[in-house]
Amino acid sequence: MELIDIADALCRDLEGLTFSPPVTHVYNPLVYAREPQRIYLERYGRGGAETLLLGMNPGPWGMAQTGVPFGAVPEVRDWLGIEAPVQRPAQEHPKRPVTGFQCPRHEVSGRRLWGWARDRFGTPKGFFERFFVHNYCPLMFLEASGRNLTPDKLKAAERRALLEPCDVALRRSVEALGVIRVVGVGAWSESRARVALEGTDVEIRRVLHPSPASPAANKGWAAAAERQFREMGIDV
């Protein structure tokens, strides 16, 4: 399957899911930001990468705006060369508006990750020949206050219903990409990769998450991540 077909199938599988408080709003950028996402998957998901960098789920100022994992607007528009119309979520939280490529806020994690890719590899072609960046879960969950609620904090039954189709999509994506290694960006993504890919020959590792909530990342994420990559035997 092509990556865009896998994403569309995942959308269909997630359609009937419901989430109870504290979740009040659910954004699915695979639906309302499908055009930039399609460009990303079709342009960069064919590079023959050996390593998949796997994030958790969209952030409010990244993929929720651009449809691209860790997708801070400047890096997606100016380095990846992607800019396309973005619609609005069916139910939009007033404190978390979707303005697409006009969004004035920029996801710190995305600026760190894609900024490292730009600085280290120079061109998208050079990066995507080695790596591909994807998210395990395409949904963003918001509380009444507008606070982001990550998938690991969902109620148990709702979390189980979400994880099953996401596991299937990850297995299909790994097969489509032909990667030999999945590196979770953070512990939770690593743990989901281990479950979803159990019984395969795919190597599972972990790298520090570039979140500003991480003191280690704030001390220099790029240098820390490169040390971890070298420890994995990945030459960067």
Image (cartoon, grey):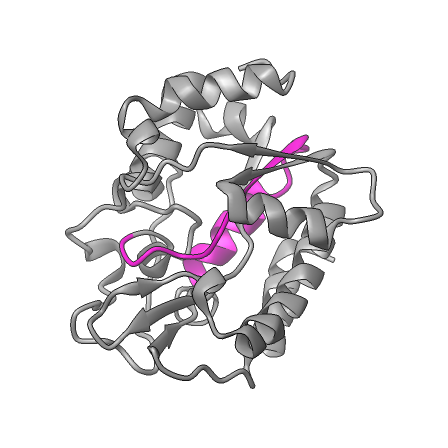
Q: Quadrant of residue 52?
A: top right
Judged left or right of residue 230, residue 155 is: left
Q: At 19% across and 55% down in the image, what residue appears?
A: 103
Q: At 39% across and 33% down in the image, what residue appears?
A: 113
**Is residue 183 depicted above or below 125 in this figure?**
below
Residue 34 x/y as whole percent: 46, 64
Instruction: Depth check: give the residue in front, 86 or 165.
Output: 165
**Is residue 160 depicted above or below 216 in this figure?**
below
Farthest residue to the front: give it.
156
Q: At 61% across and 48% down in the image, what residue appears?
A: 191
Residue 123 x/y as whole percent: 44, 24
Judged left or right of residue 183, residue 82 is: left
Q: At 15% across and 52% down in the image, what residue appears?
A: 104
- Residue 36 part of the magenta segment: yes
Instruction: Depth check: give the residue in front, 139 or 178.
Output: 139
Judged left or right of residue 147, residue 38 is: right
Residue 41 x/y as whole percent: 55, 50
**Is residue 47 depicted above or below 191 in this figure?**
above
Q: Which residues are magenta?
A: 34-61
- Residue 216 visible at all: yes
Judged left or right of residue 120, residue 25 is: left
Instruction: Depth check: give the residue in front, 221 or 4.
Output: 221
Residue 72 x/y as whole percent: 30, 45
- Residue 89 part of the magenta segment: no
